[in-house]
Every structure is written in structure tokens, then in C-alpha cells.
Image: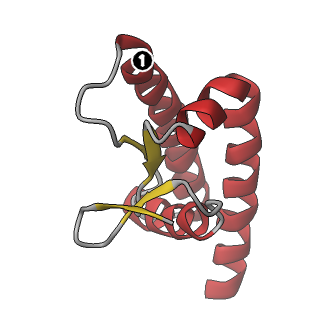
Amino acid sequence: MKSGFQKIVFAAAALLMSASVAFAALSVDAAKSEGLVGEQPNGLLGIVTAAPSPDVQTLVSQTNAERLKRYQDIATKNGTQVEQVQAVAGEKLVSTTPAGQYIMTASGTWQKK
């Protein structure tokens, strides 16, 4: 049952990633490539730079709002806590982040992958 749940969450994460790309195709990718944002273990996009522009702040806020909505929908559908969905999605997003982009470590620091 747990593996079935994980398959659902992984599928949802893949859908989420493609939806995020459709939502802000070049902006999220460009911000990641420029080292302005990175993936966090909680499944949310985070700001890496100390002085983000308003555009970066808006991009992160909008992307995270969409992700949280999807995570909540998945949690509700599967009768689980949203934090569990976030953790599984975060693990997937962090693990699939390409080399040269930033990820947040479990200790809360940014690391270039």
C-alpha cells in the first residue's frame, strides 16, 4: 500500500513539475540555472539569493501556491497529511535537480548539486 501511495505521489510530482514548467516555463528554469532559486526537501521552491528581485519573489510565491494546492489535493484524495506528500515530492524534486543547480540540505543550507 505504501508503494502504491508513493507511485501516486511520484506521478503527481511529475505532473506538478510539468505544470510548473507550463506555468512559468523559462522563468523557473532560468531562475534555477542562474542560482536564484532551488528545490527544498518540503517540495517547495526556495529563494537562494540574499537579495531577490520582486520578480523572483513573485515567481516563488506563485509556484509554491500552485504546488501546495496540488499537494493538498493529493493528500485529501489519499487520506494522508499534506506534510507527507510534501516530503515525498521534495525528495523527488531534490533528487532530480540537475547538477549545477541548488538544493536545500536537511540542515537548511543551500548546496550546489
Relative to residue 90, is residue 66 depicted above or below? above
- Which residue in the protein does label 1 denote? 58
**Label total for image:** 1
Q: How is the image coloured?
A: secondary structure
Query: What quarter of the picture does the N terminus occupy?
Result: bottom right
Pick whichever, 21 or 73, lies toward us.
21
Pick whichever, 55 or 7, lies toward us.
55
**Local crowd size for mark 1, using a 10 Å CA cut-off: few (<14), some (14–19), many (≥20):** few
Residue 52, x across and y down, in percent: 32, 24
Q: Residue furthest top?
A: 54
Residue 65, x across and y down, in percent: 46, 30
Badge 1 marks a residue whose secondary structure is: helix
Residue 101, x across and y down, in percent: 54, 54
Residue 55, x across and y down, in percent: 44, 14
- Which residue appears at 59% of the width and 41% of the height? 33
The amino acid pointed to by label 1 is Thr
Relative to residue 8, is residue 101 depicted above or below? above
- Which residue appears at 62% of the width and 31% of the height? 30
- Which residue appears at 66% of the width and 65% of the height? 96
- Which residue appears at 59% of the width and 63% of the height? 78
Is any part of residue 45 visible from this angle? yes
- In the displayed structure, does residue 44 sit left or right of residue 18? left
Pick whichever, 9 or 51, lies toward us.
51
Relative to residue 110, is residue 6 depicted above or below? below
Pick whichever, 86 or 25, lies toward us.
25
